[in-house]
Image (tube, coloured by chain):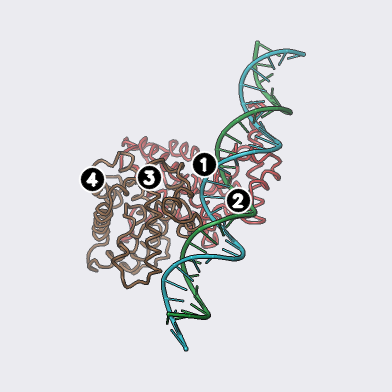
Chain colours: A brown, B red, C green, D cyan
Amino acid sequence: MSTMTAAPSPFSPADRPQLGLRERKKIKTREAIRTATYALVKEQGYDATTIEQIAERAEVSPSTVFRYFPTKEDIVITDEFDPIIMDELRARPADEPWLVSLRYVMHRAIQYGLKEDEEVSRLRSHLMVQVPAVRSRTMESMSVTGTMLCQAISERTGRDPESLEVRVYAMSLVGALMETTLYWAEHGHEGDFKDLVNRTMDVLEHGLSD
Amino acid sequence: MSTMTAAPSPFSPADRPQLGLRERKKIKTREAIRTATYALVKEQGYDATTIEQIAERAEVSPSTVFRYFPTKEDIVITDEFDPIIMDELRARPADEPWLVSLRYVMHRAIQYGLKEDEEVSRLRSHLMVQVPAVRSRTMESMSVTGTMLCQAISERTGRDPESLEVRVYAMSLVGALMETTLYWAEHGHEGDFKDLVNRTMDVLEHGLSD
DNA sequence: CAGTCTTTTGAGAGCTACTCTCATTTCATG
DNA sequence: CATGAAATGAGAGTAGCTCTCAAAAGACTG
């Protein structure tokens, strides 16, 4: 999911020879822009990094950067995890309790995301804390994740994905996970993120009461 | 709270003669900018409205607009409800169940906000749906509301306001209310917003199960 | 392989949100 | 009324982002 840590891309272009040269080049360009951005941001900080610099290092024109990413923040936050989470959720046995499935899939996503490139994960959540624009944009992208979750919940429970109840439920979940990520980053990424997620899920299940 | 509807200002400058001329002028300028913005946005839409136009109609210079509001979105979304909600929460009897207090205060806030200027309320939530930048900025400001809620929860329950549990709880609540506002706006503001909030609180209390 | 068609790219102009500086005006104070 | 502090306006400058158009590069057909 968008709030979660993630690697630039789950697949390298070489893995998809079935794609035409055009498509493969596009994927490479996309990765080049993101890699350049991460490097520059790490060197000089987010605000000091301009699109022009990113374009230069990625060896494309500034126009091309905007063609691939609508905003500067998107270069940092975009990931490809939403569909993966969806698939994982669908793959869970239908009789498994919803919250159990959710917890399991979250753990999988964390495992997957962190393994891919832990440093990028941390830089990203760090930026969420430091740069308001990135945080805003992340939250914005979370609403996409929320919509996706609504769909998943609907498939599992038969409820209307457009109903207020489902939407509220999904959004409160997404908000909670966002806060968990922030909390983790604010505390220097210490401790196991998985444990934090567990505690978060506990709060959502039982409230603050116990 | 920030996601909630609200009037430009709860008090008119005339009500505070104890303030110096300087302070009163500042309040007036602030209101003039906001009023001008609402009018222009209503006439031409958000994106088509430039800071220059706003400045012209408010009869100030563009520099002054930025001196009062850090970003264009802030002109639209800033409100003064967070402290009011805090006070209301503190005023509730200490032995009242937390969720009851919360529900009560939410209703009060809605009542208050809608009465002040219903049209502005609706325009604002409409912009949340239509303009991504406004939605992002609203979400951003919600984290402020979330922090405030953490404080309130802490005062009521004695828990650490910085703990993961409290923060997650507050943020899921805020996210849920945000989604409720969006839902209301997407459905043409039909029906009683109070009822929607009640349903939202039900979901938060009991989950989707029942 | 040549030629055509389509997609992608680069170059550059242009808009606007936003920042910073400095001179001027406006209010507060003794 | 004079002196000091704060708010304003004017203007220059930065950078994100959009749009247009012509050149370059991959895809397809005879």
Q: Amino acid at mark 4?
A: Asp
Within-10-Å neighbours for mark 1: few <14, some 14–19, many 20+: many
Q: Chain of mark 3?
A: B
CB under 8 Å between callouts 3 and 1?
no
Which residue was labeled with disc 4? A192
Task: Respond whether the residues carrying marks 2 and 3 are from the same subunit.
Answer: yes
Going from the N terminus, do you reach mark 1 or mark 2 first?
A: 1
Going from the N terminus, do you reach mark 2 or mark 3 first?
A: 2
- The front one of A27 and B180 is A27
Task: Respond whether the residues carrying marks 4 and 1 are from the same subunit.
Answer: no
Q: Chain of mark 2?
A: B
**In percent of the image, x 32 and y 35: which residue is there?**
B158
In-image side of C2 versus D9 (left or right): left
Give percent across and percent down for residue A33.
Answer: 41, 54
Within-10-Å neighbours for mark 4: few <14, some 14–19, many 20+: few
Give percent across and percent down for residue A200.
Answer: 29, 48
Badge number at residue B170:
3
Mark 3 and mark 1: Cα distance apart in space: 17 Å
Badge number at residue B120:
2
Give percent across and percent down for residue A97.
Answer: 24, 62
Which residue was labeled with disc 1? B81
In-image side of B50 versus B136 (left or right): right
Q: Secondary structure at mark 1?
A: helix
